[in-house]
Amino acid sequence: MKSLVSCAEALRLDSATSSIADLQPILLMEDASLLLWQALAPLAAKLGAGSSSLLLAVCGPGGNGGDALAALRHARFSGLRRVAAILAKAPGELASIHAASLRALGLPVLDWTSERGACEALIAEAGLIIDGLAGTGLSGPLHGPQASIVAAMNATAESGRARIASIDLPSGLSDHNEPAWPIVRASWTLSVEPRKACLYLPPAREACGLIIGIEGVFPSDADIAEEASLLEAGDLRALSPLPPGSSYKGTRGRVAVFAGSVGASGAALLCSRACLASGAGLAALYASPETYQSASASLASVMVKHEDFAHFEPERWDSLLVGPGWGRTEARRGELASLLETGLPAVLDADAIHLYRELYDSGFRARSPIILTPHPGEFAALRDERALVGAWPRILADTAQKFQAVIVLKSHVTWIASPKVDSSVELAVWEGLDPGLATAGSGDVLAGLVAGLLGREAARAPGRALGLADAYRAARAAVIAHGLAGRAARASMGWFEAEALIGEAGKALGLQA
């Protein structure tokens, strides 16, 4: 896992590093600019920027502007001659030093306000634009000259004439971004480690392009306040170790599934099969009378039982999965309450999320850990909002705290939140960006994986009540396995149906060959 920080924490770390190491800020900027240029150089070479086409730095008055100007000097010293810079505003103290150096070398350094026509011509001529317009200190939308420059940069990039490499984060992006704010659309973001969490906000992620981590600017063991952790494929084994060799079906987790209805039986089949793909030893689908026969004919390894809440035996199960294709009737709301009153840890998906919100508003509280797996629309419904905008990490953390639940907010970038006993909230992010996963039933498979891994958590420690930390571990493991399954399915067959994810998830978890 990689640590992600807020923009405010990045600013604090910059100041603290200068103080602790007794470094003048100009020296820290020089170190950063050299590392940035080393990452930029192969991109520039591939595009012919600085030789056959123009390498252009677009700079604001702050630190990112100074980094971009210094990187341009490194480019010139490495032999590139077609280089130029645009200043959006009068540069600050450090950026002024680097601007003066470029002018001393005879390189064009133009002012947007007084030389706008010439600046627009440079942007149109560029093959690669280094975006150093704004950085982590941004607290509101770009406006005036900076907003105009963003529009010009994006227009030339959208035309295919130029590519944009943003320093640290695309200009216009911050911890508090709103959809209407002007933001640079980068092909690459050269993010100084630790990376900024806002790079992975779903509304902004595509504007960042390929995120390239730049290490060595700050001490690797620096004390930081982590905003979230970025999940990686290598984290899966620690989060979900293989079952011991002595395992049998009763000790690998037993999951009871309540899902499906007329017209939505596929959701029940997918999620119950995914429970077994997670490594759970037993899964049973409690089917309604209308779907019982078709489910029995379609499922071989999953037990299919008649939906009978009066005689449900919670002691036979380690976890619950409720909601995919289940319906939202008043009767279902009461049935969900009776299931949660058993004290079994539960995964609530789709219809059950809406039902739980209604139960919560009436004063109902679950007795054991629950995991909610909403997509953005369902998450907005939890908060009585039409859309999720603004500071995603804070909004997600507040919602997880309110419901005292682990929340898996599914999107092209998936965020996971879990309340802690000290009233803080842990956040994790999975870098998805896989359009293959945007297929009907994909979320049902994820819900099944989460429920199966939650059951395995319970089975590993019989007699111990699970806590939110256990649920958080299961949720993160399931999200990684689901994401890796999508990548594998896309690589082997292109576009795929959700059924393909089930076997691939088992492989990702090390349970299938």
Image (cartoon, rainbow, N blue to C red):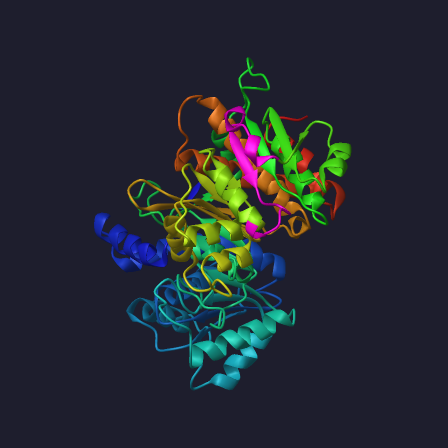
Q: Is residue 264 above or below residue 467?
A: below
Question: Residue 28: in sight, yes or no?
Answer: no
Residue visible at 54% across and 41% down in the picture: 479
Question: In the rendered image, which quarter contains the C terminus?
Answer: top right
Q: Is residue 318 magenta?
A: yes
365 or 309, which is in the foreground?
309
**Where residue 90 sits: x, y (%)?**
35, 77
Query: Given the current orientation, which residue lies at the most extreme top position?
Result: 246
Q: Is residue 63 magenta?
A: no
Q: In this orientation, does residue 473 appear? A: yes
Which span is picked out in magenta? 308-330
Image quadrant where one finds the N terminus: top left
Q: Where residue 110 sits in the image (x, y, percent)?
A: 44, 79
Toward which corner of the image does residue 86 lie, by quadrant?
bottom left
Residue 226 percent coordinates (x, y): 35, 47
Vertical relation: 258 (above or below) 314 = below
Query: Which quadrant holds residue 287?
Result: top right
Name the residue nearer the viewer: 395 or 80: 395
The residue at the point 58 percent across, 52 percent down is 328
x, y percent for residue 325: 64, 47
For the residue pair 216 and 145, the one nearer the viewer reads as 145
Q: Does residue 232 lie above or below 42 as drawn? A: above
Left or right: 174 with respect to 455?
left
